[in-house]
Image: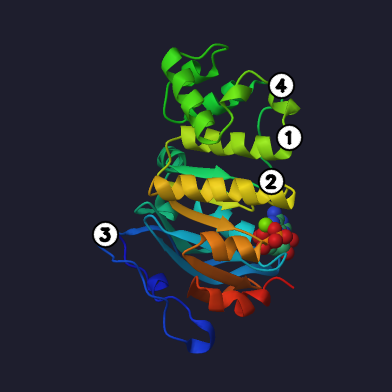
Amino acid sequence: MTTLAAERAVGPAGAPAAPCLDARAHPLDIAAEGIVKRFGCVTVLDGVSLAVRRGETVALIGANGAGKSTLLRTLLRLVEPDAGEPVVLGESVSRLGGRALRRLRRRVGVVFQRHNLVPRLTVLTNVVHGALGRTDLRAAHQAIAPRALRDEAMACLARVGLPHLARQRADTLSGGQSQRVAIARALMQRPEAMLADEPVASLDPAAGEEVMALFATLTRDAGMTLLFTTHGMAHALAYADRVVGLRAGRVVLDEPTRPALAPVLERFFD
Ligand SMILES: Nc1ncnc2c1ncn2[C@@H]1O[C@H](COP(=O)(O)OP(=O)(O)OP(=O)(O)O)[C@@H](O)[C@H]1O
Ligand SMILES: [Mg+2]
């Protein structure tokens, strides 16, 4: 497992580094070292380093345009970084060729703000599609997927509390239901780690709270690493072990979560 300078977490104003989980029991699952991303002449990520240990939940916060989504995307090279090295599940991502990169992406569940379900397909079929990466493509694409896949998809739907909606078309769901289905689809991937970009931002506060709690509980119970971006300070404080703050493409905060952090975090949410 790669050791990165990113492990030397950045405390505010040169404060001591945030304590890390035991490196042997919790190797780095997601790391970035000196990531730079420019769009034209604008530098959006300016040497970002980050380290998330196995089983850790980390919230990435920052104002609009701070670079959160871009950073998340560079980790799997959904956006190609101009410099720097993402290391995910022990793989140096920038060195991977097409097939190896696809294989790695299958090991990481990704949940976006907009769920990207296929509208005209049933909820169950959408969840079955989560298995596309790890099973015979035709099996998961069939109008009627094999029994084992359907059973597993039903189990994933049960985990998000929606087994009764299995036969409903995805375009008939509420926002909260859709996002739960998107989480079920990500679980169907049997991921080792999860990246989530504002997973509840499109939901009303009550639904957002419910879905975020469910998501955090499911990943924590599975011992899964979770890196999520949020504009919700309460969500960062309630569900993350650690909070990383971006400002203008730089990490300016990396602290374990504790109630006393609230006034510090407030500066990121004005
Ligand atoms: N494909 C692109 N082409 C040009 N500029 C881009 C592109 N993607 C992102 N940007 C710019 O990069 C900056 C960071 O965007 P990003 O979406 O990463 O911010 P963010 O922190 O996720 O913001 P938000 O909280 O609004 O989601 C913004 O100024 C944005 O306009
Ligand atoms: Mg964003």
User: Mark 4 — residue?
Assistant: 120
The residue positioned 37% from the left and 51% from the top of the image is 89
Q: Looking at the image, do the residues carrying marks 1 and 3 touch, with CB atoms under 8 Å apart?
A: no
- Mark 1 Cα within 10 Å, few/some/many (few <14, many 20+)? few
**SS class, disc 3:** loop
Q: CA distance from mark 2 to mark 1?
A: 10 Å
Whether 132 is drawn above or below 235: the answer is above
Q: Is residue 157 left or right of residue 113?
A: left
**Residue type indicated by callout 1:** Ser
**Residue type indicated by callout 2:** Ala
Ligand 2 image-quadrant field: bottom right
- Upstream in sequence: badge 4 or badge 1: 4
- Mark 4 Cα within 10 Å, few/some/many (few <14, many 20+)? few
* Residue 174 - label: 1
User: Mark 3 — residue?
Assistant: 25
* Residue 207 - label: 2
**Residue type indicated by callout 4:** Arg
- Upstream in sequence: badge 2 or badge 1: 1
Q: Nearer the viewer, mark 2 or mark 1?
A: 2
